[in-house]
Image: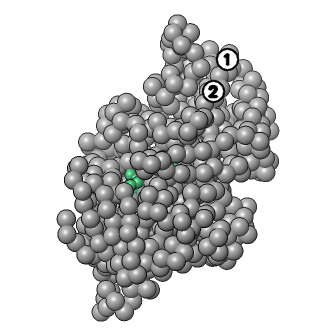
């Protein structure tokens, strides 16, 4: 493919799509390269195994070098926003004050971010789940919190018409066939395509060659080697994907912070067995959340979630007959997940073949936070009279963050406060990789807000070049 565009965007998730919308609206010629495939809504896989195989990197089994933590990340047009739970939260002072202190970037405050949050929220249908949408798992969650004197709240999701009464929301994690979930293909990406965005799927980017006046992106599309040239590049491949591409491009030599300070909100899944049927697989998958200020201070939150049968069978720490006995009680299971705001950083590297090597210890303060959260879940289920309590013996991560932290200094950060790679002003990043620390809050709305901000800054740079004459 011979092309010389204004902008090449790598990755189509929360960041890439918002930036694509911003730039194409201003008339820039943009091409987006995405390793995953493009699905029309009704073609999203119809069962858990196919969803994992087709929509996730490594079938949902990306792991650290010591296999202590599994990473789930979307590999599909729309990235994580196609497979995620679409819980959209703004960051609080605790998260943004920490970012400001670590990065020296002054726009990280609830006041300064509000304009960007407002701008992206205006493009999304947002819905706060009401009591009429609760399933039994949510009822048990709220009742248990009240029994123990903890505060809970209602979740806000990006959804337009879930028709909860039809009972199949568990399928949401394999892509929303109703086009209700506010994923990128039905929101920002759809608009960007209408505005002229060119999309290349099945394109695995391997490297970037950086030049003062353009970037050259190379990779494989359907097995064939390809090169795309553009005046500017946006790397929006998510924390792991972006760090991998930059490391493979040899940028680590000039950027000592590349691949450092990787965070992941490690999770501990807990199941409780009740005599009554819970049927947690029916109705809204998640409806309520922990709103307990003391949990935020202690560094964890408790998630009201459930898993499909394949996921549940992997979480039960048993084999054979015992595992079968548990799985027979699937309809009697309630679940609650502990998600921590991790403070022990991991490190992303690549091996000689360019494959990810991720180190992410769950030790010290992080282990303490996880155990603290699990003990609270146990207390809640005991108060509810659960018959049995099971904690999964491995951890997993849905939120990968950091590796290309934003900050003033090149010694400690990869990206400058204008969302440009230090020393490479025509290479921009605003995805989850720029997080200076773990917020302990769902990240995707903030990734979109940062990307809106970055897109605005890029438009200003283009002002008298490709966007000349565009209103
Ligand atoms: C099951 C699940 C549930 C989640 N629930 C929530 C939630 O409720 N709320 C929330 O805020 N967050 C949630 N998240 C996390 C959220 O989806 C991510 O934080 C967010 O999508 C990250 O945005 P991003 O733009 O950084 O990367 P992504 O959205 O992951 O996009 C990166 C894209 O780049 C592509 N890519 C990567 N490498 C390459 C390459 N080499 N070449 C070409 N393309 C490449 C990927 O395929 C992907 O499409 C969830 C995640 C999962 C997996």
Q: Quadrant of residue 91?
A: bottom right
User: Is residue 82 depicted above or below 167 in this figure?
Assistant: below
Q: Residue 367's image quarter?
A: top right
Of callouts 2 and 1, the N-terminal one: 1
Q: Does 174 sit above or below residue 406?
A: above
Q: Position of residue 17 (x, y in %)?
A: 39, 64
2 or 1: mark nearer the eye: 2
Question: At which x and y percent is residue 466?
Answer: 31, 86
Quadrant position of the N terminus in the picture: bottom left
- Along the line of sight, which residue is nearer the eye, 240 or 143? 240
Q: Secondary structure at mark 2?
A: loop
Label 2: which residue? 393
In the picture, the disc for residue 388 is: 1
- Which residue is found at the position 31% from the left and 78% from the top? 6
Q: Residue furthest top?
A: 321
Where's residue 47, x and y in %?
35, 31
Residue 190, visible in the rendered structure: no
Q: Position of residue 31 (x, y in %)?
A: 29, 68
Label 1 within 8 A of ligand 1 by Cβ: no
């Amino acid at each position: 493919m011979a092309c010389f565009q204004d902008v090449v965007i790598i990755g189509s998730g929360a960041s890439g799509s918002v930036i694509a919308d911003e730039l194409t609206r201003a008339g820039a010629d943009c091409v987006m390269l995405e390793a995953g495939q493009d699905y029309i809504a009704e073609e999203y896989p119809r069962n858990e195994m196919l969803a994992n195989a087709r929509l996730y990197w490594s079938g949902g089994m990306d792991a650290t070098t010591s296999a202590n933590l599994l990473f789930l990340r979307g590999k599909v047009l729309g990235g994580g926003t196609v497979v995620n739970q679409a819980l959209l939260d703004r960051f609080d002072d605790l998260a943004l004050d920490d970012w400001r202190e670590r990065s020296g970037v002054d726009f990280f405050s609830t006041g300064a971010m509000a304009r960007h949050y407002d701008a992206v929220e205006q493009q999304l249908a947002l819905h706060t789940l009401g009591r009429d949408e609760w399933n039994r798992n949510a009822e048990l969650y709220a009742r248990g919190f009240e029994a123990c004197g903890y505060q809970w709240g209602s979740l806000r999701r990006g959804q337009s018409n879930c028709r909860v009464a039809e009972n199949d929301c568990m399928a949401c994690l394999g892509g929303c066939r109703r086009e209700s979930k506010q994923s990128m293909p039905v929101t920002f990406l759809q608009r960007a395509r209408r505005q002229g965005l060119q999309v290349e799927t099945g394109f695995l980017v391997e490297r970037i060659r950086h030049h003062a006046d353009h970037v050259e992106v190379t990779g494989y599309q359907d097995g064939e080697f390809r090169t795309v040239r553009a005046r500017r590049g946006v790397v929006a491949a998510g924390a792991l994907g972006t760090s991998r591409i930059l490391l493979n491009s040899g940028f680590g030599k000039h950027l000592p912070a590349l691949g450092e300070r990787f965070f992941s909100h490690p999770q501990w899944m807990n199941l409780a067995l009740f005599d009554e049927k819970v049927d947690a697989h029916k109705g809204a998958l998640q409806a309520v959340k922990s709103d307990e200020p003391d949990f935020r201070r202690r560094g964890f939150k408790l998630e009201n979630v459930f898993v499909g049968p394949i996921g549940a069978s992997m979480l039960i720490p048993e084999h054979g007959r015992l595992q079968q006995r548990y799985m027979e009680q699937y309809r009697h299971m309630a679940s609650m997940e502990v998600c921590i705001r991790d403070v022990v950083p991991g490190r992303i590297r690549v091996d000689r073949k360019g494959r990810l090597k991720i180190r992410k210890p769950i030790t010290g303060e992080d282990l303490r936070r996880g155990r603290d959260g699990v003990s609270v879940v146990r207390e809640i289920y005991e108060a509810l009279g659960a018959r049995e309590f099971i904690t999964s013996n491995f951890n997993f991560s849905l939120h990968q963050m950091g590796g290309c932290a934003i900050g003033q200094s090149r010694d400690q950060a990869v990206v400058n406060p204008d969302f440009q790679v230090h020393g490479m002003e025509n290479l921009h990043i605003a995805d989850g990789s720029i997080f200076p620390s773990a917020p302990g809050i769902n990240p995707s709305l903030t990734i979109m807000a940062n990307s809106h901000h970055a897109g605005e800054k890029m438009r200003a740079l283009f002002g008298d070049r490709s966007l000349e004459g565009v209103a």
